[in-house]
Amino acid sequence: MILSLTSTTGLALCLLQHYMYNIRLSARAAAAEICEVEGEGTIRKTATIKWFKRFEDGDLDFEDKPRSGRPSILDEEDLRAALEDEPSSNTRDLTDKLGVAQRTVVNYLHKFDFVYKKPRQDPYELTESQAIRRIEVCRQLLDNPLNDRFWKRIVTCDEKWVFLFNRNRSRRWVPRDQNPPSVARQDHFAKKVMLRVWWNVDGVVHFELVPDGRAVDAELYSEQLERVYNILMQHYPTLIRQERALLQHDNAPAHRANLTKEKLGELD
């Protein structure tokens, strides 16, 4: 077994490979020996084979020849500093920043036993009174004497802002036995699109994205009502023909506008 290097710089590795060449180790065995002591990924077999070929040709210039591509040796402190500066960096970002091969970055991350984890998002917190009120409403619904047929008649809708962001950017490089720090929920001023969903007791009936720059006004809501009506006619014809469907919506301006009332009258 060889002694561990105090430095894994290119010159130190070249000298060590030259020593192994002189004691008649094969290039493959030399590469395996170095990686066993210094860590997986310290040097590749192909690199050792090239160095041994140079020694065999009498070339004892330990400086790397000019070549294309990126080096396969990385300063561990540089990598740790890069991760501390921007823990969400992916391996391609680290490759560009450190000027080494991507495979080298991956090998060193494995050597550190780092994994790419997604942090937990802190949920919006309910006040105590809000939580108590929700429990009360749920119990009232469970205790309601009306049978299941009533719930099957209800169709309702709601909207949700969907934030557009790079999921990979939310991940962090952390030691395997640690969790990344939690992060705040997405900024309300970030790029986003509105999703409108209609559902009943069976699940989602219809959903659509609101066109960019368009508000949910009475005109758009009336168009959506007609689309939902046609879907209900297709999947729940008896409910529509017997005029038993119940639309539940809040008192938003678009829902109580005269245009909306006229559309509901047409569909009734």
Image: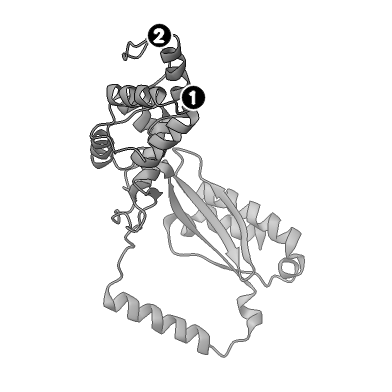
What's the residue type where badge 1 is placed? Thr
- Left/right of residue 38 with respect to residue 267 in the rendered view: left
- Left/right of residue 142 with respect to residue 154 in the rendered view: left
Q: Judge depth for marks 2 and 1 and give the one in front.
A: 2
Q: Residue at x 59, y 48 (%)?
A: 223
| Residue tagged 1 | 46
In the rendered image, the residue lying farthest to the front is 23
Residue 64 percent location from the top left of the image: 35, 14
In the rendered structure, which disc, 2 or 1, sits on the residue that comes first in sequence? 1
Q: Nearer the viewer, residue 151 or 31?
A: 31
What's the residue type where badge 2 is placed? Gly
Residue 258 percent location from the top left of the image: 50, 55
Q: Is residue 258 above or below residue 81?
A: below
Q: Which of 46 and 268 is in front in this view?
A: 46
| Residue tagged 2 | 58
Q: In this view, does 244 lie above or below 87?
A: below
Alpha carbon separation for disc pair 2 and 1: 19 Å
Labelled pair 2, 1 in contact (Cβ < 8 Å): no
Residue 82 percent location from the top left of the image: 26, 36
Q: Which of 44 and 143 is in front in this view?
A: 44
In the rendered view, how is the structure colored?
one colour
- Left/right of residue 212 with respect to residue 237 in the rendered view: left
Q: Quadrant of the C terminus?
A: bottom right
- Report helix, strand or loop for mark 1: helix
Q: Residue at x 51, y 90 (%)?
A: 143
Dividing the picture into quadrants, the one containing residue 40 is top left
- Report helix, strand or loop for mark 2: loop
Q: In this view, does 145 lie above or below 25?
A: below
